Amino acid sequence: MLAQADAPARRSAPYPTPAIATAPRGLIAVPPSPYAQKGKMALMAGLVAFTVLVTVWLFVGAPGGAPGVMRAALPGCIAAIAAVLAFMAAELPSLDPGTRRFWRVFGVAQLIPLGVTYVAIIVPSVAPSGESTIFVNSVPGITQLILLYAMLQLPSAPRVGVKRVKLWLDLSTVFVGGMLVVWYNMYAFTEYASASLVVPFAMRHLESIGDVVLLVVLAMLWRRTLLRHRSTVVVLLGAGLLVHLGGQVASTIDMLSGHVSLRWTMLATPAASLLFAIAAWYEAEFSMHRELRGDRISPRGALTISLLTYAAVLPGFALLIKAAQEEGAQPLGGLVLGAVALTGLAFARQVTSARETVRKQTESTLRNNEARFRALVQHSSDVITIIDAEGTIIYASPSMWTVLGHDPQHLVGTKLITLLHDEDVEFAANFLSDLARSTPLRGASTPGALKREWRIAHANGSWRTVDNVGTNLLIEPMIEGLVLNTRDVTEQSVIKQQYMHQAFHDSLTDLANRSLFLYQVGHALNRASRAGDPVTVLFVDLDNFKTVNDSLGHAAGDKLLVEAARRLANCVRDSDLIARLGGDEFAVLVEQAGSTEEVLEIAERIEVAVACPFQLEGKEVFISASIGIARTNGGENSDELVRNADVAMYVAKTRGKGQHVLFEPQMHTAALERLVVEADLRRAIDQEEFMLEYQAIVLLTTGEIVGAEALVRWCCRDRGTVAPGVFIPIAEETGLIVPIGRWVLKRACRAAQDWETERGLPMRITVNLSGRQLQEPGIIDDVRTALQESGLKPSRLVLEITESMLM
């Protein structure tokens, strides 16, 4: 797979945006592969196994017995590790399908040595030796065919018919040349060697030819691989094949010397498997990297690679010459000449093909680049303009017609600023001046650029907003000017303005929202600090608005809010800012109000305007407005000023609603105290810090105590005894009165039952209920539970409410 050298270019935003860390050119910064740690552990196991194998080989003499079994088992274990790593690499989602297919088939090929291990250890004890020998001798050829199929699945393998035919011709040339050497060696070997060594000797040669064929394929893949990490993987695979080839050659030399030993094969096979495992781990570790190779293969370099690849045949020729010298002259001169001629033809064909390919690729690349550049300029939807250092247009692309309606040739020789909006002329002139003074770049792959946005005249008289990217190429011989890449962003600019409006305005009333209001309050405070004028915020809350929503519906409530916003706009000055903070809450920012009386007049006008009836659903609806007023005293920020106005509004509601209150510092202290009391009250419920005091009910005629009224008291561990007038209103407002009342019911009923048991006389207990308790659907269950748990008769319990609560 040919990786893209650069990520797609991103358009810069027209407004400052947070900096984004980018990876170097040609790289994609990614977190390490999740397979990397597992791969490292598997590789460590392979290294340990390979070390054990080398130790056994060096220090144990006889091939039989337990050491022999270990020699046969360890290569299979290392091959299994390589297979596991290959299968792990095949599951990486970052790889293309061809590469995943390669690693999957490669893993299957690595599992085949396990069969060899099975035959070497188990089969000899249960099967005739001939069957195991046939199996063992056929395994390497099958493995090499599977590896060849796997390599042809890689994306860098040739896909076009001609290239695929060339590859097969090359492989056939190598194979035929190698078979000539095998034939010659077999002819010499069979004259003096025993019959039992003929098959192993032939299989060593065939395995060597297979390794050379695979090395030729890998050399071709390496030349066609552009990614740096992928080329390293190919090199590791080639190193493994070379190690395996060396083991086969060494075993062949031993056989020619009359020694029958598998030591070189048993050492080279696990070493090759270990290199294969490292290649699979390397693929998993760097699969997300997209760095291109810095080296480019020249025709001479391609020839060198081809010669190095085919040089793998030379060990066979060395064996041929050695056998000829030892056995004397033989009638095989034609065979030698044929092998040399065949290999020479393969070299000549590879060199010619490489040179032709490089030449065609070079010419094709140049033509494609020129055609691509010409097409991009001629048919680009963006306008490409070249101007000189004085701002005169010296070239305009044909897209000037479609984008701005001007004839490109007629614009040549005119000043660019004559097309710009009057308000943008100075801005654009500064931009061109900065661009001309910037460092000119020549031959840079990613030249520096400046970006600006301005309005330019269309041929039909309208103004178009365009985004411009300027590049200084004054010293580039083919350009010698400032290049402007211009794109029409009028629609995007309109949409952006709409989004900005929606982001900072209320969708229902079209007033400013909380974010914009706080932003403007902050700016007003900055201006006031320089001018010395106070800033005032009015916090307006519509009283009983929830009742309108519950009775007439939310649609009617929305109409009321829209009408209320319109009335607020009629009550303030044009310079004042009105905002809807949420729900039925509004705020007004008043600047340059010289006196408090002027602000109070605005508040009174708002109260009168809101108090007028609203026509909703054919009905007259009356509401009022509670207004909190906060003025700067020095040092407040926007949040604090709005908070103070909110606190004053809350005080206005507690005083009866429909009025305005000017913020005083003690109000904030009271609000904070209320929050602290509420927090302590919640803790008191959990820790049961309450107690009951009982007020006796006496029968006046006899003086007998016939009952008692339960009165709750709060014994706070930090405050001491807290008066009911302090915590009862807060408990009712926050709803905490419900769990407190439930506790009072249970404790009072239990006390009344205890008194009745002790005295033997009926005892009546009176408990006060709040309005919040009566509104709770579980009040009946609370009363029933208190009576059942205490055993008090229902007739002994009196639930009492006040007249105001009843109203």
Image: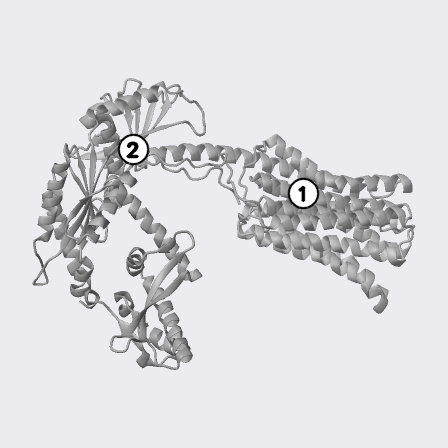
Q: Is residue 559 above or below residue 701?
A: above
Q: Is residue 60 left or right of residue 239?
A: right
Rendering quarter of residue 305: top right
The residue wearing badge 2 is 635
Q: Is residue 803 left or right of residue 238?
A: left
Residue 777 seen: no
Q: Disc 2 marks which amino acid?
A: Gly
Q: Is residue 545 above or below residue 784?
A: above
> What is the x, y in percent for residue 632?
23, 35
Residue 435 seen: yes
Farthest residue, direction front? 702
Residue drawn at (67%, 43%), measured in percent from left and top? 236
Residue drawn at (48%, 40%), measured in percent from left and top? 4
Rounded to the nearest whole Å, what is the CA distance between mark 1 and mark 2? 70 Å
Rendering quarter of residue 199: bottom right
Q: Is residue 380 left or right of residue 296?
A: left
Colour treatment of the image? one colour
> What is the x, y in percent for residue 35?
60, 50
- Checking the image for residue 162, the label placed there is none
Secondary structure at numbered mark 1: helix
Residues 256 and 93: in front is 93
> What is the x, y in percent for residue 519?
27, 38
Q: Disc 1 marks which amino acid?
A: Leu
The residue wearing badge 1 is 236
